[in-house]
Image (cartoon, coloured by chain):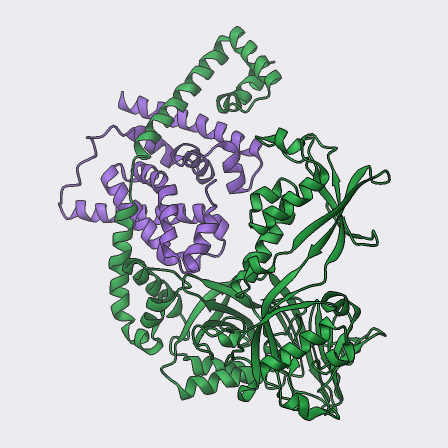
Amino acid sequence: MNCTDCIEKLTELLEGLLPETQRQKVEEHLKDCQVCRAEWKELKELGKRLASDSRTFRQTNLEDAVFNRIMRLQNEKLKQADTLNRQFKIWRKIMKSKITKLTAAAVIIITVVLSISVFDKSVATASAAQVLQNAIDAVSDLWSVHMKTRMRTLPADNFSLIGLNYDFVPIEMWKRTGENGLVQWRVEKPGRVLLMDGQTTTMLIRPNRGVLRERPLPLGCFDSWSGRLLNVHDLLDNELQRAKNNPDREVYLRHQEVEGQDKIILEVEVAANVPEGDYLRNTFITGSDHLKVYQFDTKTKLLEGLQVYVHTDDDDVLIFEVTDIEYNMEIDDSVFVLDLPENMNWYGKPKKLPDNELYENMTPKEAVTAFFQACADENWDEVLKFKASSQIDERTKAYLGGLTIISIGEPFQSEGYARDGLGWFVPYEIRLRPVERNALLSNANSAGRFVITGWYDNKMQLQEEVKWLNEPEILADNDTYAKMSPDEVVKAYYDALSRLDWNEMRKFMLGSYIDQLERACQEAAKHKVDIRSNLPAIEIDKTFWSAEHSSYFVTYREFGVKKFNLAIRKDNPANRFVVDGGI
Amino acid sequence: MAESDQYYIDQCLNGRPDEFRHLVRRYQAVLSAYLTGRLSNRTSAEEAAQETFVRAYFGLSELKKRRSFYSWLLGIAVRVAKEQLRDQKRLAQADCPPQQAYEEEKVDLDLQKAIARLPDSYRQIVLLRFYAGRSCSQIAGQLDMPLGTVTKQLSRAYAKLRQFLSDEKEVQR
């Protein structure tokens, strides 16, 4: 190594960044070369000097001084902005806002001014009404719209249902008006599609349930809150009318820079349309206190986004979001065609029965009792009289057939369900027919204890494969568990389940599976489901070795119970109660 | 691990202005050191550093490249320093005695001045390395340059610093 090379490497040596071999070479050269050694010494001294000096400066604490100055300046700006303040009720808004979650008054002042300082740089006089009017004008010649959104809902349930803990489900929507004035639209999420092709309106609940109406229905039909958004003009006009009619409504307007573009943000507070404590509170957007955040482009005035937050006691939860909007683009014709499976099960309005009177006179409790009794008797023709569908599918038959009624409770109502008091919720508790199942267990793992590796039905068809990517952990008391036989493990698993002892269950079953189960139970509990009353009991039948799987099968019977509320409604032409939704 | 500058800026602009504290904490020593070099006085330097942060706070929504907050902040500091030097000159002309040079605390004024004389790109790196306590690889990440470039620039900065410091010694003799 020569001197030039060596000197080049000194900084890296000082930083400890040289690879071992290079370091050795540099150090060897330094031993031999006095000039480089002197250079190295000076460099080290400079490094020390910088480090020591920086220590002095790193004791500097300007935080409080800086924030005091900011506060002082902001108070001055606040006074200047007082008029604006009153106009937009920013104070009220921010004092109440849980979104910003600002509690300290000091911080609140900062927010107000930060908003204003961005705010007063352009259309300071714009009011919410003007912004909305501009946005309405911008969509005056709208002939097609395509929206991508996401919502905390269930993939196959209706387009209004929300759950604060649900995962986001994508919802995609299209609407177009042809040159002949023909309107078509489609609203879709993974398990459910609504299609209006100009003549008929179809709802498909995947895989094969459906409702067909031989006429065009408006957007919003079939409980489709999100579908209404496609009527952009009406959506904005509705907000505009409300803004005009109720000037005291909580509206908050501000500017925000998004990816270098100036946007106008309009926030609107909306109160729930069901009372607090109602059974359906926070299960629909309209049934919750919520905040709508609209985003408009300053230049084009177009609506570009919408977010909906539901207020809860301790948080604001983003529940719905438009992630993308396209206006006036070509939509392929195939979007407005729905491929239906051959074995469709169509739901319609129940028609009058020959002995309709018998059913019309039933009380909610009698109707639910008669429905479950028909299931118990596997009298599916009778069951159909309480359903709006054309047939009962095999899954439902297998699930409900042969059940035992434990109890039917006192019916109750919710303001959010069925008009004119024609809908009821009826508490029920039933025992399901025992199901034979087979658990597959293996102890070929480093912990040497039996864990569940799969589930099979009574015909030995695989129902669920459990893939252990990592070996089961070796427990503190691993020996105790290693001594358990496969059937003891299955028993212990269900015992732990009956106590909701998730940690114990993890000893026999993949953690991620238990996590899912735990989350599902927490979610169900939020919907007022009494989990402990819905846990199955089991009876072990036999254990046998499977050479094919090199594992043991444990055959057992599962005695499921179900305790919940059945939704029934009689707002139909036949004037009798039908069971709504699934069980 | 601490969040990036951009993260805190986003937080500030999304209604959590208090998050600006993190940026003050991160760069207060850097600004104080640099401004001490420019203004030859630590008290004025801290005053100027506060002013720099306050201006940055109110200008945050105008910052286009949020990743480049640090260079932008130093740019503001340069302007603030120029203004203060102008004011000091005016005061001197008006026969007001200049503020006492900061002597009480051990501040290596020669070193500060040498840092202040460095070209912008070298100065940025030296300040980050020592006064913001960042490692070379962290600097590489923040300034979006290869690690080798950072160490090369640092070497050159050291050479310059040594040159400036020995110039200063000559003058003092």
Q: Is residue A84 left or right of residue A185?
A: left
Q: Position of residue A427 (x, y in %)?
A: 56, 72
Task: Look at 17% across and 40% down and name the residue there.
Answer: B99
The picture quadrant where one finds residue A227 is bottom right
Percent from the top left, x then y, of residue A161? 58, 72
Give the quarter of the image for residue A184: bottom right
- Does B137 sit above or below residue A577? above
Q: Nearer the viewer, residue A293 or A258?
A: A293
Q: Quadrant of the C terminus of chain A?
A: bottom right
Residue at figure coordinates x 39%, y 80% from the top left: A249
**Seen in the image, is A269 located left or right of residue A325?**
left
Q: Colour of chain B?
A: purple
Residue A572 against residue A503 in the figure, above or below: below
Q: Residue furthest top?
A: A32
Quadrant where the N terminus of chain A is found in the figure: top right
Q: Which shade of the palette goes to chain A? A: green
- Above or below for A239 versus B25: below
Q: Is residue A328 visible?
A: no
Residue A126: x percent and y percent? 41, 79
Residue A93 seen by the camera:
yes
